[in-house]
Image: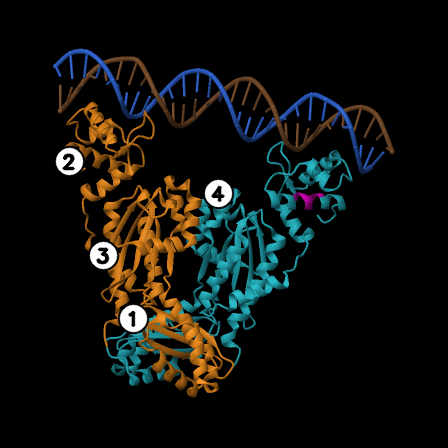
Chain colours: A orange, B cyan, C blue, D brown
Amino acid sequence: MAELSGRKQQILAIIIERFIATGEPVGSKAICSEMGNAVSSATIRNDMADLVELGLLEQPHTSAGRVPSQLGYRYYVDNLMATYELGIDEQERIKIWLQSFSGEPDRLLEKAGSILAELTDCVAVSSSPADADAKIKRIELVPLSEHTAMIVLLATSGILKSSVVRSETQINVDIAEVFYNICQNYFIGKSVSDINVMVIQTLVASLGDRVFIMSPFLCAIADLCEAVKTTELHLKGQSNILNHEELSEDAFSLMDFLHRGTPLENMLGSHKKQLNVAIGTENLYRELKNSSTIFSKYSVGDKDSGSIGIIGPTRLDYARLIPSIKYLASVIGNLLSETLDEE
Amino acid sequence: MAELSGRKQQILAIIIERFIATGEPVGSKAICSEMGNAVSSATIRNDMADLVELGLLEQPHTSAGRVPSQLGYRYYVDNLMATYELGIDEQERIKIWLQSFSGEPDRLLEKAGSILAELTDCVAVSSSPADADAKIKRIELVPLSEHTAMIVLLATSGILKSSVVRSETQINVDIAEVFYNICQNYFIGKSVSDINVMVIQTLVASLGDRVFIMSPFLCAIADLCEAVKTTELHLKGQSNILNHEELSEDAFSLMDFLHRGTPLENMLGSHKKQLNVAIGTENLYRELKNSSTIFSKYSVGDKDSGSIGIIGPTRLDYARLIPSIKYLASVIGNLLSETLDEE
DNA sequence: AGTTAGCACTCGCTTGGTGAGAGTGCTAAC
DNA sequence: GTTAGCACTCTCACCAAGCGAGTGCTAACT
């Protein structure tokens, strides 16, 4: 496929870039003038016919200009696209924007999604680190009132989960001590996958009456472990779907797809590469057959954990968006690693 | 307006209920048969003409059936609607659904929004309690690693906010003690409105070098106070907008409106009554001129604090939805009051 | 006075036909 | 391999005719 003549490559690039910019089919005359009339429109028409033959272009109907096909976009992304680098000031702006947000990991991802949605005019998806091998790094009991407390769990995946628990008995120092002892002996350092409601129940039984009052707290820990290993998806900018003409037709099915959650999760899970660009039917799900997706993984402590990216029309400004998403993912990885980088 | 004859009321109710169910204009013949042919269609046509005269009905065009006008819906909601009560089992289902969700207040509201969106096929909006008069009830420092800690702040509005803070110095018992002393002396019991970055800065200055290392923690407290008094809006089921024919026309402006946030916030703030039903142009914002909104406030500790409700087309099943929303609000109020009900 | 049957009428929706415009494909010449 | 010229194709916007549903009105009835 790479044996395209230089002029054909040039024509293809012009068509794709113009089409990305305007959304209108591109005619031979327009290309001709864009090339400074180096060749005539008829010549370009001949080349265009060849490109259609090769499957890189399509014509909506006989007498319309040409439009990039899925394959055309793929060729562009792989061979033609100028790899544009993010400006330093834009980098700084994103970084500061995210850093200023001192919050929990999930909130950070949510925020990053908002920024991305804003930046790209697409639906942004961010997934929290879901690592079934994550170990419990720390558990804390935070008293809130006589009968309620918050339990905070930090996992080696960098994720932090908390839950408010109500106890029938008053929560005092003794109870806290018993709680910490149990945590130290049975939870800290264990894999979150090993902790579930069953384990908790046998544990409670073995500890006997004395710690029966611990039961709600321990159940909460099981819930938190469950939450740690569950990918949480953050969707932002769903309304951007309506900004794109070409998606409005299946806006409904697309919205529905996004809200179903599981398929989206599967899709993210299926990505092998650091950066994943899927155009049209290259996507795992047919609901996305008219969409493109760009996702990048981020790493927490040297380990790939979650992803962030966008879903938009196939008519995307790949050259601009790919570097932005890459960069955003790297910043997220750095920030999420902060609670883990010592000890 | 209440001096409508019984038959006219009946006709109005039939038209509205049929229209809510089918979305089609209702003709005189259909009404006639619905009334068991008690009177002829011509009679009904006469009555319908009067109802149009009164502004309670509209005809899309001369030869179509009738459709309820905004005023018609209002009359229906105020006078005609059978006040339907929620079934016990449905009540239980909602309650258990929400209770099972042991989390933080904001998560609870998010969850409640999801349930409501599901239940009503509309966009659900829930606002967290925003109470500028809220006092700081409790502040806790939760160590996470050598250099990071989480700060948890509980306010009398029932809201719980937390933030992860990174410190240059190692976080040890001494620092924690200094932190708690400062909190006890300067923060606990104070109104969140009184704490801002300015106050923190003068406080840090007055404390001198010794506690300079406290600065990031205290700044975090200011941020948390800010967060406590800021209404947080949770939107759920945005895609449901596309489920309703009559909204798809201004789906775009509606989506945009929802995502702008501030106007929505203003709108919720403007509600005086416990339950607020606004139909079409009764809404504060013209973006909602073709929509209806149903919102109910919930109370945390005897104090109205936030709201939950829906935004949908004017063609809503008011009789079914109003009791559901009322009930949901009451459950939320009860659950959120749990961390406050003692001491 | 309120109710009814009958009928002409109005209006929106669909279908089919027409004309303009844009861009192509092809052919023949360079 | 490139170019000019021209007939051709297809979409889109516009208009007219036919239909069907439901009305408004009139005149008669209780």
Instruction: For marks 1 and 4, give the CA distance.
Output: 46 Å
Q: Which residue is mark 4?
A: B248
Q: Chain of mark 3?
A: A
Instruction: For marks 1 and 3, give the CA distance.
Output: 28 Å
Establish whether labels 4 and 2 are both on one chain: no
How many residues crowd around disc 2 within 10 Å: few (fewer than 14), some, or many (20 or more)? few
Q: Residue A154's image quarter?
A: bottom left
Q: Nearer the viewer, residue B138 or A257?
A: A257
* Label 1 element class: loop
* Label 2 element class: loop
Q: Which residue is mark 3?
A: A91
Is residue A115 at least partly visible in the picture?
Answer: no
Q: Which residue is mark 1?
A: A156
Above or below, B130 relative to B239:
below
| Residue B216 percent across, percent down from the top left | 29, 74
* Image-based side of B233 in relation to A342, left or right: right
What residue lies at 37% left-to-right and 42% top-to-bottom?
A244
Q: Which residue is mark 2?
A: A3
| Residue B188 percent across, percent down from the top left | 42, 80
Amino acid of disc 2? Glu
Q: Chain of mark 4?
A: B
Amino acid of disc 4? Ser
Above or below, D2 relative to A6:
above
User: Disc count in the image?
Assistant: 4
Q: Residue A164's image quarter?
A: bottom left
Establish whether labels 1 and 4 are both on one chain: no
Mark with earlier residue (3, 2): 2
